[in-house]
């Protein structure tokens, strides 16, 4: 998922973005831009050390608001910038958060405006998120680890850290997350946890059925819908595993991914994982048939002008198999199927729902969705038919996750 997919998702949110001293401060400039693009109002607050790495002028230009650096700022009529700023915020996110800054927080110190406003915030309604950034030795130091543990205990959310090359030339743990990752974390943070504690299994993408080592049969499924659902379910608090056919899509943040090629592979992996899942969502466009036997070597033209005769056998129906399992029958596993139809969407979706034995079947018009970023969905269950009008696959995935969560919590309540 790119930052563009998150356009508008923070609209109406007021974010205080804090910068402390660290070479990762350059990423905060990009992060600030992404926050405003996502619709947030951003108030930047910088520590003295932070101003050594980025200038308030840059951050003002990117946020569209004058930056605060001092608790003695004369713009605060009541001389209480720390109170005013912390009361207005929906969240405070400090990126980068240096080792020294985390140490100050752990001790409840308030030597300048940023730590002061973190201390003064009403913790029950203004969450504090920290994106640490430091050298690997500083990160690994027991003092830092103690402080991180302490600030977590005190209610802060710690994002990352990432592993990799560091500004100092060393390599290891302690890198700040990238700007897009920080944005995704913040969007996920604000998402209601409707699927908390649920293990969700999703199949996505096409399958590839080999004819010989270089050729095979596949289809135009892009996997975008399944990947968007995986992301939305993860943001809603679920533990998500995505079984993906051959697609060129990045793994959604926080999602476990198992790559497979053929329908038989997908069947084996999904059936195994379904034994431990609470929700199974089958979005994969699984090939109905596969060549009866794949040739071990490339089939060559023999010059006679006759084409090879291919015999096919039917693939297992993954969804139907899992939906007929004992766990699904007993209600421990809630199954959701997809139907890509070219006509009579609702009638076909209803018939498919009964045939596959799933409580919820989601219909879409195949040719109108393959490869596109938007879609229209029709939800068919025993309550009737609900239409989700044309929207981005991201938006539809969020709505669908909400619909599934409502049905699952209804069935266990
Ligand atoms: O029968 P049809 O392919 O139209 O059914 C579509 C639904 O069944 C989708 O949810 C798809 O992921 C699932 N399916 C499956 N295994 C198959 C065929 C379809 O899981 N072999």
Image (cartoon, rainbow, N blue to C red):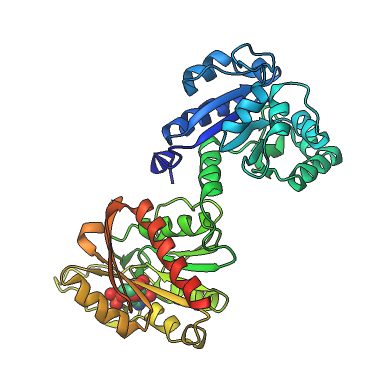
Query: Does residue 20 sit above or below 228 in this rendering?
Result: above
Quarter of the image holding residue 404? bottom left
Spot occupied by residue 123 in the image (x, y as percentages of width and height): 68, 41
Quarter of the image holding residue 301? bottom left
Query: Does residue 65 sit above or below 291 in this rendering?
Result: above
Spot occupied by residue 30 in the image (x, y as percentages of width and height): 51, 28
Q: Which residue is drawn at 75% across and 29% down?
A: 101
Identify which residue, 3 or 299, lies in the foreground: 3
Quarter of the image holding residue 238? bottom right
Identify which residue, 393 or 43, lies in the foreground: 43
The single residue placed furthest to the left in the displayed view is: 305
The single residue placed furthest to the right in the displayed view is: 142
How many circles with numbers are drawn on the protein?
0
Can you see residue 22?
no
Tell whether 80 sits left or right of 248. right
Identify which residue, 37 or 180, lies in the foreground: 37
Identify which residue, 211 or 249, lies in the foreground: 249
Spot occupied by residue 403 in the image (x, y as percentages of width and height): 40, 65
Can you see residue 271?
yes
Q: Residue at x 51, y 33 (%)?
A: 14
Query: Does residue 338 sit above or below 83 in this rendering?
Result: below
Q: Residue at x 42, y 59 (%)?
A: 229
Quarter of the rendered structure image containing ligand 1: bottom left
The single residue placed furthest to the front in the displayed view is: 78
Spot occupied by residue 29 in the image (x, y as percentages of width and height): 53, 25
């Amino acid at each position: 998922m790119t930052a563009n997919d998150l356009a508008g998702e923070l609209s109406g949110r007021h974010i205080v973005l804090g910068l402390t001293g660290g070479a990762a401060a350059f990423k905060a400039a990009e992060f600030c831009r992404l926050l405003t693009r996502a619709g947030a109002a951003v108030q930047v607050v910088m520590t003295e050390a932070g101003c050594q790495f980025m200038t308030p002028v840059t951050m003002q230009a990117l946020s569209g608001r004058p930056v605060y650096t001092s608790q003695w700022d004369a713009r605060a009529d009541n001389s209480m910038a720390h109170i005013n700023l912390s009361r207005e915020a929906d969240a405070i996110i400090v990126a980068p958060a240096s080792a020294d800054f985390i140490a100050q927080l752990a001790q409840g110190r308030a030597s300048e405006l940023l730590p002061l406003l973190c201390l003064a915030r009403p913790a029950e309604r203004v969450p504090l998120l920290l994106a640490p950034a430091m050298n690997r030795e500083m990160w690994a130091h027991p003092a830092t680890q103690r402080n991180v543990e302490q600030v977590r205990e005190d209610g802060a959310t710690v994002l990352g850290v990432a592993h990799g090359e560091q500004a100092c030339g060393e390599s290891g743990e302690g890198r700040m997350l990238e700007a897009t990752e920080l944005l995704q974390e913040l969007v996920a943070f604000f998402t209601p946890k409707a699927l908390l504690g649920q293990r969700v299994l999703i199949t996505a993408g096409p399958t590839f059925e080999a004819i010989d080592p270089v050729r095979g049969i596949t289809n135009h499924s892009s996997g975008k819908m399944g990947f968007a659902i995986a992301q939305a379910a993860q943001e809603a608090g679920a533990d998500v595993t995505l079984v993906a056919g051959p697609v060129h899509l990045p793994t959604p943040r926080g999602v476990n991914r198992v790559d497979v090629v053929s329908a038989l592979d997908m069947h084996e992996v999904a059936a195994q994982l379904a034994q431990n899942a609470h929700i199974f969502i089958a979005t994969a466009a699984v090939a109905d048939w596969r060549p009866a036997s794949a040739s071990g070597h490339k089939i060559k033209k023999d010059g006679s002008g006759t084409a090879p005769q291919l015999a096919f056998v039917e693939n297992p129906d993954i969804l139907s198999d899992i939906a007929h399992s004992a766990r699904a029958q007993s209600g421990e596993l809630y199954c959701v199927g997809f139907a890509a139809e070219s006509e009579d969407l609702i009638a076909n979706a209803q018939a498919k729902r009964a045939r596959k034995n799933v409580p919820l079947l989601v219909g879409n018009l195949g040719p109108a969705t393959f490869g596109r970023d938007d879609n229209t969905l029709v939800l068919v269950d025993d309550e009737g038919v609900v239409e989700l009008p044309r929207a981005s696959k991201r938006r539809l995935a969020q709505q669908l996750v909400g619909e599934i969560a409502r049905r699952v919590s209804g069935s266990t309540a």
